[in-house]
Image (cartoon, coloured by chain):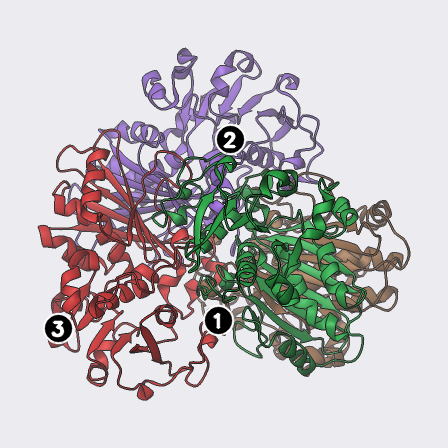
Chain colours: A purple, B brown, C green, D red
Amino acid sequence: MSTRIAVMGGAGFGGGEIVRLLLSHPHVSVVAATSRRLAGKPLHRAHPNLRGCTDLRFCTPDDVPQVDVLVLALPHGESSRRWDTLKDLAPRIIDMSADFRLDDPEAYAEHYGTHPRPEVLPTFLYALPELNREALRDASHVATGGCNATVSILALLPLFEAGVVDRTATVLDLKVGSSEGGAVANEGSHHPLRSGVVRPYRPTGHRHAVEIEAALGRSGPARVHMSVTAVDMVRGASLLAHAFPAQPVEVRDLWSIYRDRYRNEPFIRLVAERSGVFRFPEPKILSGTNYCDIGFEVDPSGERIVVAAAIDNLMRGAAGQAVQALNLMMGWDERAGLDFAGLHPI
Amino acid sequence: MSTRIAVMGGAGFGGGEIVRLLLSHPHVSVVAATSRRLAGKPLHRAHPNLRGCTDLRFCTPDDVPQVDVLVLALPHGESSRRWDTLKDLAPRIIDMSADFRLDDPEAYAEHYGTHPRPEVLPTFLYALPELNREALRDASHVATGGCNATVSILALLPLFEAGVVDRTATVLDLKVGSSEGGAVANEGSHHPLRSGVVRPYRPTGHRHAVEIEAALGRSGPARVHMSVTAVDMVRGASLLAHAFPAQPVEVRDLWSIYRDRYRNEPFIRLVAERSGVFRFPEPKILSGTNYCDIGFEVDPSGERIVVAAAIDNLMRGAAGQAVQALNLMMGWDERAGLDFAGLHPI
Amino acid sequence: MSTRIAVMGGAGFGGGEIVRLLLSHPHVSVVAATSRRLAGKPLHRAHPNLRGCTDLRFCTPDDVPQVDVLVLALPHGESSRRWDTLKDLAPRIIDMSADFRLDDPEAYAEHYGTHPRPEVLPTFLYALPELNREALRDASHVATGGCNATVSILALLPLFEAGVVDRTATVLDLKVGSSEGGAVANEGSHHPLRSGVVRPYRPTGHRHAVEIEAALGRSGPARVHMSVTAVDMVRGASLLAHAFPAQPVEVRDLWSIYRDRYRNEPFIRLVAERSGVFRFPEPKILSGTNYCDIGFEVDPSGERIVVAAAIDNLMRGAAGQAVQALNLMMGWDERAGLDFAGLHPI
Amino acid sequence: MSTRIAVMGGAGFGGGEIVRLLLSHPHVSVVAATSRRLAGKPLHRAHPNLRGCTDLRFCTPDDVPQVDVLVLALPHGESSRRWDTLKDLAPRIIDMSADFRLDDPEAYAEHYGTHPRPEVLPTFLYALPELNREALRDASHVATGGCNATVSILALLPLFEAGVVDRTATVLDLKVGSSEGGAVANEGSHHPLRSGVVRPYRPTGHRHAVEIEAALGRSGPARVHMSVTAVDMVRGASLLAHAFPAQPVEVRDLWSIYRDRYRNEPFIRLVAERSGVFRFPEPKILSGTNYCDIGFEVDPSGERIVVAAAIDNLMRGAAGQAVQALNLMMGWDERAGLDFAGLHPI
């Protein structure tokens, strides 16, 4: 019998993407997707790709029935604000917003404002299978990480765990697509202004840094220097991490470290070729997939390690990793519903 | 037991796409994909999306074993030139090139040069399930149509069969992506010259016109005036067909005609909304899908019918429809291996 | 002494472009540019390219002084609504909106609603130098044409005047960039939804058709069938006109007709090469220029003439032709301030 | 009387751009532009923007007459290889290639191979007006800097001269357009593979680093950690420099430092707004201009300074700065021929 799932916030980009994944998931039945604005309308009104794929229509939050799993794809702040009405709708809850990602109310307050329900924070598990797979199997409430945080953590985790880099000096330079800004238009997302840009969008002060430092900090002190630049693509987040060796290191050492750490990971691929066009990770071929591709190079002088990593921000950075977490929580094959290989050329 | 399939010409865009589809097809096993240039190399050397999805490596044409189905994804002219060595490799052959699409050697000669094996032409069936589904079930040798021909035929078939338009006056104005030019770089495909273009690529004399007229000509005389313009996208073909009514016609008549004709078609969707952003077909959300989306509008004066249609040229225009034909030839569910819904936003 | 000019509506795309042109015009001094929203702010707040080029700040409409020439770059409907306060600001007025383009109040009403000041319509001259250069020299009030109308008229004028085409059967298939939608963001212009599209934006019923028919109608009856599709570029309008010969015609005849008609035109270039990448007009190299590039081809069967034409919609389709008209009205060199050659690659 | 100039290597992107600039330069006459491949053909065969702007045709190198100034826009390695035949063609020579940028033959050898004419290296001046304006006024032989080097040096010069940053720890993360790869197509520049990419093109080992360190090294030791990523644009280079303060520093200090250093520079603009869309430098509005836009921000923790800078790589990074150098060498207004403001939107 199918597991019954409802998606709150079904008209946004993350919501549409997880509905799409769940509609073709072998063990799941989507029973509701909410949108106050589009209540009563077919899903393809917001997600034209779903035309003909489902008869489901958007409903209001009040119409959501009791389900097995509740997925929250609401704007930041909504999950915690509406927690009292949400918490009883399902025994398992997956929140894709930032509301329950941090353990520390003070860290939350610094980046998002005072948390309305700090006592709920400890009941949520930050979901990143490569970091805490076993804990996820027992979790009932999980918060999936931010897109930029996810790609950064996955890129750096092996280096920090192996202790081969200066733990406080890493520069994270991210290039991101326009879908990271969400489904609501604004002046900066107007096509004539957004097309073709390389726009320093958050040179300093990005709030995902705290998530990254929390994850990398499990193995010791961790400090990252993060900048995010908007480039001309819709999906995708691409990272260059500039890390500084704590001891002499060669590329073959990196191959060992990354292979050992990610040997059995179904959604990590190592990409560091010596020739050809596709030498390092690129986000565009990852559209629709749950992969995080990771590559690396060492400066000829040995002074710097550059780690390149890429994800589809709506998949591995949001809906895909939510499904990956769901699969673990439910005891299913971790890859269920996530078998799309991605397109080339695209 | 899986049906064993080999793909000749596996390093091109069409070849890569059909290998991708077949790798995840429920009834199929891919036993070989050829590329002389990349023989011995893993498939991801040409198709980076396939990294980690298969251990298969490219082989030379000489290494292709006897199989159940042979798919030819070779450059135009190669299938017919190498026919003697190809024909005995499998009892069923699907050719994605132009070599066996036309029945008439003279029509072929006009657009492609003298056909080296005209006697083979009648043994191939032009594969378009919406046109000749039943014949496909019995076919052993099929030729899939050209991308621009496919979208044009599907857009106009109902109007021509219903006899509501002037059969010799239709203008076909197509906008196509860069992947239509194939995987080999040329001066015009150099990114600085190709990015952002609206380039009249073939204002007159496109060789797909003869395919279109052959298909539409089944119900009477048919003449089309075709132009193709290159625009800034990678995948996709988009058509505006400007047709002239042979009798007064309103939009509701068109709805009846198209609904009646395509009622049970799994890969045709009608898209003609009165409001919203996605009122008419758009190619970008079709990337990776086998759909042909079709919409229409009538000039306020009633003087013209405009039909809009869109496909992914590498899917519905090539590899997707090859799999659809395969499914029919093998007696499988027509949708097997073609269930990807497409991405939004993208 | 410089001619003093004020621009009403200086924060929009057309307004910004004409301010830019006038700032470097040899005979002009820009004394005011209005924006209620940005009053008091430097021009670069709306037009980042103008940073460092001028100390001018936006002012409110009430602050506009008496000037020699008033340029109206207001949203459609504003010029006529505010006519009483505008008309006395300058002896010469150039309106870039649709308000005074049509002579016939009924034609206006059909496409834009009832005209508030129909008696003013006959006092404005529709400005298209290639059509009515001499009249422009004496004009005090001119309305510049719509972008899509301008490229269409220039492409077809020689054929209609020469009487070589069926005057009621021409199909106009236009591909346009996102700047045609203006500077205000909307759902459809949101980058994730607008990037990479081929979106049938106005398959029928485009209101520029009436302008085109008025201009072509000077030499006899004229009927056009117009469709506009949005593609992925910011600037530019590209036309394929599909015309049907009224008599047998060859390409060399077209060369004669177009050369004769446009021999001395400084802003018309004929582009119809037999080889190379840049065989026909393309909008992207026209960015920032006032050119209209025009090419043509005849179907091998002789049944159809295809005319390709391209402009920068904000220049030749708006601000550039406004300056060209200004130059004629003032008796200056028609090319003054319009000498930018355009960029390649871009 | 006009200064007579010849351009060697006129068919490349840099060559086409400098020919365009010189054609509209007030004090210059272009007497020759060479291309062996296109000898005898009009310039618009390679540079479609120049159609109608000049009657000049490409000639062979042998046809170049004695001139006042010779501009070398040849592929790297050609200027030095052909030095004996080039050196006598003009008393003043501007080389846009890498051949004469470095003083040190060993540094050259490390990145480009053994220099064929090391004795010529000291006779060339590295041209960067903001660095060595006075020396340029007396120079007869100058080498313009690399595009990525130019934007990096201009971004960091004030910080290094002011001594406020750790001189060996700066990370340079550049995002560049496809025109940086030149006019010749290759597999990686094929539009289907290049469109939409964020491709780590040179994560380590970029050869412009040595130029940057030489320029910054004038005020003390200098070490940079440079990475270059290809993104989806044609023109433009965008830099985020991550620098680490040697002493506590605030944004207002940076304003002082940059304003003091660049107060009278005609082609440097400081862009660091608190609000609006265009808060920091963006390359796209710089297309066709000679500006280098520079902005900055300090991490809330004070641990890092981020400097953002952008140029048009073909202008400020090549042809524009060559003209700027020419103007200084000839004693003309430094801005002559470089007054284009740039386009918005674009």
Mark 2 to mark 1 CA distance (whole Å): 56 Å
- Nearer-N-terminus badge (3/1): 1
Numbered tag placed on residue B236 in the rendering: none
For image coordinates 21% across by 67% down, the residue present is: D331
Disc 3 marks which residue?
A: D123
Viewer-proximal residue, A56 or C299?
C299
Q: Quadrant of residue D338?
A: bottom left
Q: Are marks 3 and 1 on the same chain?
A: yes
Mark 1 — residue?
D48
Horizontally, residue D18 falls left or right of residue B63, namely left
Which chain does the residue under circle 3 lie in?
Answer: D
Residue A202 or residue C331, whichever sits in front: C331
**Is disc 1 on the same chain as disc 2?**
no
Q: Residue at x 25, y 57 (%)?
A: D150
In this picture, residue B301 sits left or right of residue C322 = right
Task: Tell me the SS state at disc 1.
Answer: helix
Left or right position of A124 against C229: left
The x and y percentages for residue D258 are 21, 44
Residues under numbered marks 2 and 1 in contact, where contact means CB atoms less than 8 Å apart? no
Q: Is residue C294 above or below residue C61?
A: below
Residue marked by disc 2: A327
Q: CA distance from mark 3 to mark 1?
A: 36 Å
Q: Residue shown at 13%/76% (left/top)? A: D120
The amino acid type found where label 3 is placed reads: Thr
